[in-house]
Amino acid sequence: MVNMDLTISSIPPFVKAAKAMTRLIPPVWRLSGISNRIIKPLVCSFIPGALFRSTIWNYRGRDIEMILDPSDCVGGNLFFIPQMYDRWERKFLTNRLPKAGVFVDVGSNIGAYALFAAEIVGESGKVIAFEAATENFQLLRKNIEINGKNSVIAAYQIGISDKKETLRLGLNRQGNRGANSFLKPEGETEEVQCYSLHEALQMADVKKIDVLKLDIEGFEYPVLKRFFDDIDGAPQLKPAYILVEIDGGPQTAERKQQLRSLISDSGYRILRERENTLFELAV
């Protein structure tokens, strides 16, 4: 198990100035290079590994705050350019995830999606967050706590596989903790207890799913294949929407198409496709 130092630093004035500048960049993704290729590398060369508490979004008058490592890929995007982070996905959740709904986050990382969904579903809703990596999970739990969402978000430090098993998780140390992968158990690793998605949902007492989001670095196909088989006799567990990383993931083109076909053949149609693909259950 890998534990990280969760000491939160005060944001230095020059970092505040850089953050204020990048947050003025129009939310057009091709402009993200101004932050990611110029400002972020320069700033982070002076603050390697530092953790800062920062507001990332405001949802209907309520700030969503996170503890972030600006030098990390996801942490840096949320710290410097949160206005660009998964914009259409957040718009979709705002429009389609119902109040008092259920959002399941497989591969929750440090909790950006879980926190945003928790604001939408409210106190009467439920967010289930599964995260395998210890360092990410520690930040996830802390981010849930500082936003006062312990009663809405249930977080589980487990891996999701196609069966109950113990796997080694390869830890990415090249500045992208979101790229930890069971498919690349090399270099620095940690041992993770894994369950099938159906088993994990039973542990979390989930009876229905409004939106299922998956971002598990190429492991989506076996997870969903087993899940659809498991819920064949329980249609109430079939998510109304599935948001899954396909084009932005590490799979080969053939595996990406297999994943699209699996979901489509299970009764879904594609609503939108970018790095993430959004599927809607066809009724």
Image: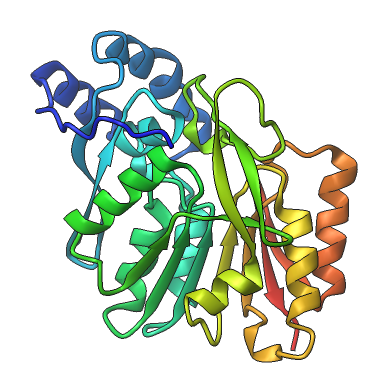
How many discs appear? 0
- Pick the residue in front: 156 or 55: 156
Q: Residue at x 28, y 35 (%)?
A: 23
Rendered location of residue 108, percent (x, y): 47, 53
Q: Which image quarter is the N terminus in?
A: top left
Vertical position of residue 239 compared to residue 135: above or below: below
Vertical position of residue 44 compared to residue 162: above or below: above
- Pick the residue in front: 58 or 179: 179
Vertical position of residue 58 compared to residue 205: above or below: above
Q: Residue at x 27, y 58 (%)?
A: 144
Q: Residue at x 39, y 13 (%)?
A: 38
- Image quadrant of residue 84? top left
Rendered location of residue 118, percent (x, y): 34, 69
Left or right: residue 240 compared with residue 27: right
Left or right: residue 63 compared with residue 262: left
- Image quadrant of residue 272? bottom right
Q: Which colour scheme appears in the figure?
A: rainbow
Left or right: residue 261 compared with residue 203: right
Rendered location of residue 240, percent (x, y): 62, 80
Rendered location of residue 31, percent (x, y): 46, 28
Q: Residue at x 66, y 48 (%)?
A: 274
Left or right: residue 198 compared with residue 229: left
Q: Which image quarter is the C terminus in?
A: bottom right
- Image quadrant of residue 161? bottom right
